Image (cartoon, rainbow, N blue to C red):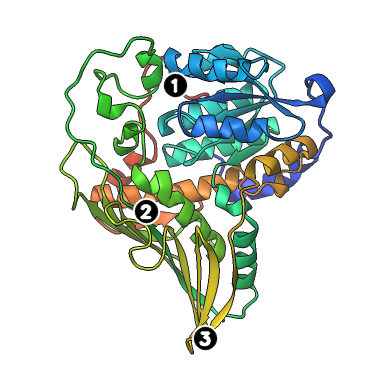
Amino acid sequence: MNNLTRRDFVKSTAAVGAAMAMPFSKVQGANNDLLVGVVGIRGRGNGLANEFNDLDGVRIVALCDVDSNVLEQRVKQYRDRNQSVTGYDDYRRMLEDKSIDIIAIATPDHWHVPMAAASIIAGKDVYIEKPMSHTIAEGHLLINLARKHGKMVQHGTQIRSTDGTIEAIEYLKSGKLGKIRMAKAINCQLRGPIGHEPDSETPPGVNYDLWLGPAPKRPFNKNRYHYNWHWFWDYGTGDTGNDGIHQIDIARWGLGVEIPKAVSCSGTQLFYDDDHETPDTQVAAFEYDDVYLMYEMRLWTPYGLEGHDNGDIFYGDEGTLSIGRNGWRVTFKNGKEGPGGLRGSYKHAQNFVDVVRSRKASDLYAGVEVGHCSAALCHIANIAMRVGRRLKFDAENERFIDDAEANTYLTKQYRKGYELPTL
């Protein structure tokens, strides 16, 4: 792999800028439509497919899933609407279709970068669900591949595309709250337990070996499959990478920071007694030169328990600004309420499509660099929790300082036949 540092990347941006600004020249569908293929279509992927399909000048033409039962159901839904869609049980076959312009990925986390990398090499632009990567090294590789091939990559932190959130961030940067010294990213929600499940036979119609892909070979287990895979390190990143990344991303954006210089994190199971490997309770502190980013996660408290839902609170010298699902609001230190507003609707898919046409990567709400930074914070926090100590981080070289054990978590082993590409 070409180990491009962050400084090298900044220097190289100008060199690739001309290529990325070239007019759109790929062969497109009828009426210049952009053609989209979606991988992982049971849950979020199905919603994502509908979002793209509702946009003018965009058509879903391919769906892919390793579960033939899910695949057949989704393909039928499109064909019932007289829309031509091809179903694939292997993403590699889908990538052979040169007419497809965009690949949208909503698989388990451990497949995000392997599929995104293959899609970029196949000449596709990529929309990739959060978290962008399963390790920090994966995110670094994806940046390099996107730049080398001049491809657009949008990360699925869609809150960035809402008008209300954009207004709130602009207010933070206006200086009206004075110096912003800390932000708290809050992930509190009530999730159900998953219980204990024994290993079992793979359900009919499921290509389980392909589902595992780069992950270690294990017997099939219901609790490691549909959605519950989030709570196992082989496939997911816990709820920090699943939902908390939205709040961490907004906190980082509002503070104007990227990779921290140090992190402390603790987490455990305080509520559940089941097959979870990842915590149900987690607290992290990300240290920067002159600000702190705090993160707290509780998966056993419902929305609204403390008067707020999943969201962020920014603490400034003159007051606070909170951002949540219901919008944003300012409270000055004298207790008076300031400006605020509703969050608004997501425009993430539309923004991505616009940039695929314009080739102006700087217009992306959450481009590959943004996605890498926010995912990296989730990974760094999880690593600090797993090794059980405060870690110093070299943001330039993206390595922990003087901690060999922590550095082993920066990458991982890939099962034979599913290795990542190299530059």
Name the residue carrying label 2: 401
Distance of label 1 from label 3 (alpha carbons): 56 Å
- Residue drawn where x is 35% and y is 31% of the image: 235
Q: Earlier in the sequence, mark 1 or mark 3?
A: 3
The front one of 241 and 326 is 326
Distance of label 3 from label 2 (alpha carbons): 45 Å
Q: Residues within 10 Å of mark 1 (few under 14, many from 20)?
A: few
Name the residue carrying label 3: 336
Q: Residues within 10 Å of mark 2 (few under 14, many from 20)?
A: some
* Left or right relative to 72: residue 22: right
**176 relative to 310, above or below:** below
Q: Amino acid at mark 2?
A: Ile
Q: Amino acid at mark 3?
A: Lys
Query: In front: mark 3 or mark 2?
Result: 3
Location of residue 13 in the rendering, given as x and y in whole percent from the top left corner: 70, 45
Circle 2/circle 1 CB separation < 8 Å: no
Name the residue carrying label 1: 419
Quarter of the image for residue 233 reads top left
Q: Earlier in the sequence, mark 2 or mark 1?
A: 2
